[in-house]
Image (cartoon, rainbow, N blue to C red):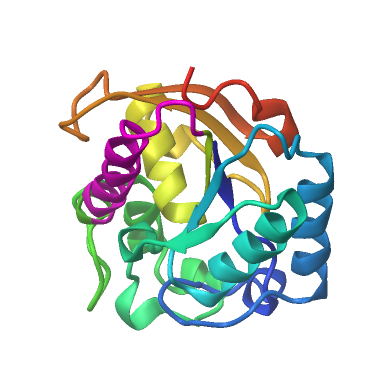
Amino acid sequence: MLIRHGETAYNHAGRFQAHVDIPLNETGRAQARAVARRLDRRRWNLVVSSDLTRSVETADLIAQEIRAPRITLPELRERDLGELDGLETKEYALRHPQDMRRLQTEYDYAPPGGETATDALDRFCRGLSAIVEGRRHGADQAVLVVAHGAVLKFFGARFLRRDPADVELPGNCRGVAAVLGGAPATGDDWADVRGWDVAPHNCEGSWGE
């Protein structure tokens, strides 16, 4: 199961948030605790997060509640938005509507100083592939991954086989149910997305089956 981290001050204020490293706000911490309380602690063996603070904090709060170890993978980081990081999204969209559309819908567009969606997604999938490879040595392990909105959006678009324009960001602490296969991570059949933007406890049973 994949989930997006809890809310931060930048989420609340409507700012771009990529590699800028800020913590959860109180709402985000409450969201993570609420997720954890509804998960079946008997099922989950490992929590994996990106190395950004908002993801680590979300993962820690969940891992403490379900009594599972937590590790980080830098490959799971959010897409790098370069010069856009921290800007107000609505103001940017008003001033640069074409660039905003390209940012949200085109795999091969990179904002100034940032990554293309393709590069970010390939990196993200390499991280997920490492998790899949690790599970082969403990096939009964169920893994919960805490990640970020933009990489999850393009992950969903690719493996739901939909236009990115038609895929919304999952909400904070909302889940994506996905069954992952083997390498290569970019193959069309590598991931089977079975649930999108749902309560994480409703994803239980979909990961690794």
Q: Is residue 169 visible?
A: no
Residue 160 location (% of width, % of height): 41, 23
Image quadrant holding the N terminus, namely top right
Q: Is residue 136 visible?
A: yes
- The answer to which quarter of the image holds residue 83 is bottom left
Q: Residue at x 58, y 52 (%)?
A: 4
- The answer to which quarter of the image holds residue 132 is top left
Q: Residue at x 82, y 68 (%)?
A: 27
Q: Residue furthest left?
A: 184
Task: Tell me, yes or no, whether the highlighted magenta stretch contains residue 125.
Answer: yes
Residue 150 location (% of width, % of height): 44, 54
Residue 164 location (% of width, % of height): 39, 38
Which range is magenta? 120-141
Image position of 167 (left or right of 186):
right
Relative to 196, does residue 170 appear above or below in the rendering?
below
- The answer to which quarter of the image holds residue 184 is top left
Q: Total of numbered circles in the picture?
A: 0
Task: Tell me, yes or no, whether the highlighted magenta stretch contains residue 90.
Answer: no
Q: Main secondary structure of the magenta part?
A: helix
Q: Residue furthest front?
A: 137
The one nearer the camera, 27 or 179, is 179
Q: Residue at x 74, y 58 (%)?
A: 32
Relative to 208, does residue 1 appear above or below in the rendering?
below
The one nearer the camera, 21 or 82, is 21
Image position of 171 (left or right of 39):
left
Relative to 101, does residue 14 appear above or below in the rendering?
below
Q: Residue at x 82, y 74 (%)?
A: 26
The one nearer the camera, 165 or 149, is 149
